[in-house]
Image (cartoon, grey):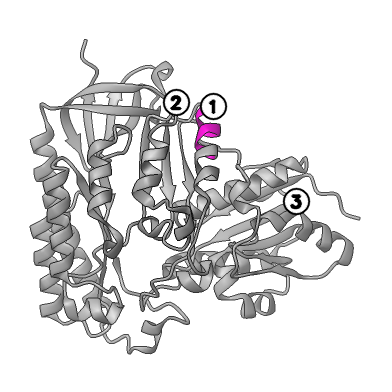
Amino acid sequence: MKTLNTFYIRTYGCQMNELDSEIISTQLQMSNLKKVDDEVSADIIILNTCSIRDLSEKKVLGKLFEYKKDKKDKIIGVCGCMAMSQKETLLKKFPHLDFLLGTNNLLDINKILDDILTKNLQEKKIDLNYEIGLENFFAKRENKIKTSISIIRGCNNFCSYCIVPQTRGREVSRDPSSIVKEAKYLAREGIKEITLLGQNVNSYGLDKPEKKVLFPDLLYMLDKVDGIERIRFMTSHPKDITKDLMLAIRDLKKVCEFVHFPMQSGSNKILKAMRRTYTKEHYLEKVNLLKSIVPNATIGTDIIVGFPNETDEDFLETYKLFDEIKFDTAFIFAYSPRQNTLASRYEDNISNTLKQQRLQKLLKLYHKILETKYTKLIGTKKEVLAEKLSKDGKSLKGRTKTFEKVLFPAESKLIGSLQTVDIESFSHQTLKGSIPS
């Protein structure tokens, strides 16, 4: 029987995937396997994949074709969203692929490997149902300053362009006591900042009314955990962002004043086609309410341009709403159809050229908004969590509570501490400053 000693994980996609990779990695290390940083020296290669964007899938497929030419005696597996969305085709298309592991079956990685070694067969473990025990498995974190905690898995929204409900299943909220227990464990490990993760964190607890703990209640519980300095969360669905959540952001010292608030489009026609369940008027009403309750809050968003049947007028509505709100953080994408979604049945009738024109126009507006914002921040003071050294080793990098990146000269001994920084300039999307003497 082949002896396995080392493994390599390559992660694509979101913070949830990064956390899933840490769960897999921790289990393999518990079985005395060593994590390595290159594919060449690894006995096991694991690709933890994402299906949200076409580019991510293409990168994974390129890697699998590469391994097909030069697999040698390595064990190769695909985990994550592509394992779920393409389970019927991946093993057939890539006969050299040894296993598929679903997003809800992360605790089965060692059994999968044992079965491969003993049976010498392709293996797959893919369930849409949440795996019992997963919520109580505390992964070893690679980042010693900040990390993520999964609080809810799956999604019930079925937006027409999104494949997440098919790859992550329906919403299942984690038990609040387990979340608090993990936060305390991370605090003992020296973690200063946690990000609460879910496809829709704001719907936390709605599937378990007997617990009587909704998302704002969970924030109040976590705010009491000693050692944790900051609490972030993402992602939010506008329909579930409540006034109670806004009040929690205002009143809780550790909760950061930043809300990722995906708009997707400023056209009601396109929002309806996307099945987003809100109008631009409803969205703007919530943004204005947040700004009235938490005046210093910053807002992030996701935008898709070039959705099927998006006219110049539809795009202009998005452009004008973006300019009105003046988002602090934005992830802007050109639409690409995802297999097995409702929107994949629509005609993808916006040319790539036009998609890119709209993308660049919105990006230009976004950069103009940021330049105005950062200019106004010069001369202010910001509290920054020092996270890591810069490449030249002379400065520290970190973020403010409102999610701005900051660079300032300091020694590495300050990593993990909160520092007040005088903002003096900016470059691109990074503020620059110094610690007052």
First in residue order: circle 3 vs circle 1? 3
Front-lying residue, 396 or 327: 327
Q: Are dots 2 and 3 in contact, CB under 8 Å?
A: no
Q: Position of residue 412 (x, y in %)?
A: 42, 19
Amino acid identity at mark 3:
Asp
Residue at point 58% right, 71% down? 84
Residue, far top: 437
Q: Which residue is mark 2?
A: 227
Q: Position of residue 400 (x, y in %)?
A: 27, 34
Q: Position of residue 157 (x, y in %)?
A: 38, 71
**Real-space CA distance between mark 3 and mark 1, rounded to the nearest whole angstrom:** 33 Å
Asked whether, in this view, residue 128 is left or right of residue 406, the answer is right
Residue at point 76% right, 53% down? 110
Which range of residues does the magenta coloring cover? Answer: 182-189
Residue at point 71% right, 57% down? 108
Q: Mark 1: few, some, or many residues within 10 Å (few <14, many ≥20)?
A: few
Amino acid identity at mark 2:
Gly
First in residue order: circle 1 vs circle 2? 1
Q: Which residue is mark 3?
A: 43
Q: Position of residue 404 (x, y in %)?
A: 25, 39
Amino acid identity at mark 1:
Arg
Q: Is residue 185 magenta?
A: yes
First in residue order: circle 2 vs circle 3? 3
Residue 188 is labelled as 1
Q: Secondary structure at mark 2?
A: loop
Q: Secondary structure at mark 3?
A: loop
Q: Are dots 1 and 2 in contact, CB under 8 Å?
A: yes
